[in-house]
Amino acid sequence: MSQLMAPTAGASRSSSRTLRVASVPAAHPYVARVTDAAGLTVLPDPTPPGAEQGRWWPPVVLDPAWIAAHAAEADLLHVHFGTESFDPAHLARTLDAARAAGWPVVVTVHDLEHPQLVDQAGYRAQLDVLVPGADALVTLTPGAAAEIRERWGRDALVVPHPRLLGALPAAPSGATAQTAERVVGLHLKDLRPNVDAPAATRALLAAVADLRASGLPARAEVRLHRRVRDEAARDEVRALCAAADPGTAVLVEHDRLADDDLAAALAGLDACVLPYAHGTHSGWLELCWDLGVPVAAPAVGYYHQQHPDGSVATSGAVGDAAGLAAALRDLLRSPAATRAGTAARAALVRDRRARRLAEDRAAADQHAALYRSLLGGGAR
């Protein structure tokens, strides 16, 4: 099947006027980057009546009645994420409503395995509606595109993830790291369903001991939100860290960090470990790349394809201590490795920022071209 299905009847639009995108969601850094092109505007996320400020709600744009009522206000529907609250039949009605409104539908397949779910059956059923039913598909890596082609016979446009870092971190005060000890971070956050916190913590503590025994000084920094979804897993992480040598491991519990505080915490690392038992792509990995922090990623999904430049090392399954130690050793001893807080790290961050700006412009241009092709009646 072609990447772009036949456009919705009556969807022809002038290429000279602004295209209005109903995005699910709209208020997200990823969406802001890929729609930052001349001639594009994104409708703000509608707020459900009576909704609390700052609370997440199922996207109103996916309501077929909302689409029918606002058909004249947008030209195209682009679904990124936020579908998990709806059953497949509802999403089929959403696609029907978009077509009735004259809106082509683009779906970006960020996740082939949903990180917020344990049981994937419902999400796979959603994908079985959205992927065949979209007029065009986008994804982030060649591996994900190949899996989409194998599972559904559809081609997806591959557009790499844009940058997530906002302002550059402050310049370092010195030219060298203060100690020889490498800091390896494990951010468990609120223990969402794809995070195997005990296995990841146990593996990191063992890997750090392995590194130290081989002459590579390292210590673990495990971070955890005060409010978590799995209290039993939190208690196990606490016990593991309490039993570790306090000179080689520290557990930091805190509230959800603001963006600047999160960037500062990550920037202080020499490497970061992803604790995911399942998943497809990682925005966390992208933020680490922006900050010059190498990543040890589990052998699931397509994390290794997000940056095939040596900055991501595959560590085996979550809980594989030997695999994690080998991945960290490769990252920390790489000639390209930079230390947290050094001038070399700051230079790397600036260089990556320049590359990101160019790549982000290209990504936005690709999205604009895709939208105009759909609305103009083109097909590939």
Image (tube, helix red, strand yellow):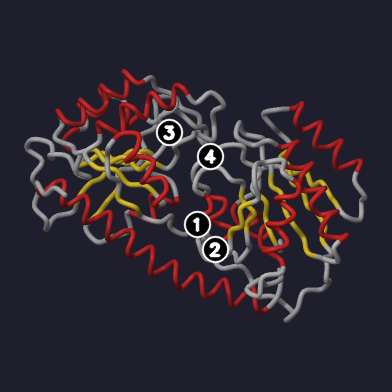
Q: Which residue is mark 1?
A: 164
Q: Are marks 4 and 2 in contact (CB under 8 Å)?
A: no
| Mark 1–mark 3 distance (CA, rounded to whole Å) | 19 Å
- Identify whether 71 is placed above or below 342: above
Q: Secondary structure at mark 4?
A: loop
Give the labeled residue for mark 4: 279
Q: Position of residue 309 (x, y in %)?
A: 52, 66
29 lies left or right of 216 = left
Determine whether the residue tagged by mark 3 lies in a helix, strand or loop. loop
Q: CA distance from mark 2 to mark 1?
A: 7 Å
> Element under label 1?
loop
Q: Secondary structure at mark 2?
A: helix
Which amino acid, mark 2?
Asp
Which badge, 1 or 4, is on the more N-terminal residue? 1
**Type of residue at label 3?**
Gly
Instruction: Please identify, in this view, whether the residue under mark 3 or under mark 4 is nearer the observer.
Output: 4
Q: Residues within 10 Å of mark 3 (few under 14, many from 20)?
A: some
Circle 3 residue: 82
Which numbered marker is on residue 282?
A: none
112 horizontally vs 374: left or right? right
Sequence-earlier tag: 2 or 1:
1
Picture disc at residue 290: 2
Percent coordinates x, y for residue 356 in the rendering: 44, 66
Could you tell which of marks 4 and 2 lies nearer the N-terminus? Answer: 4
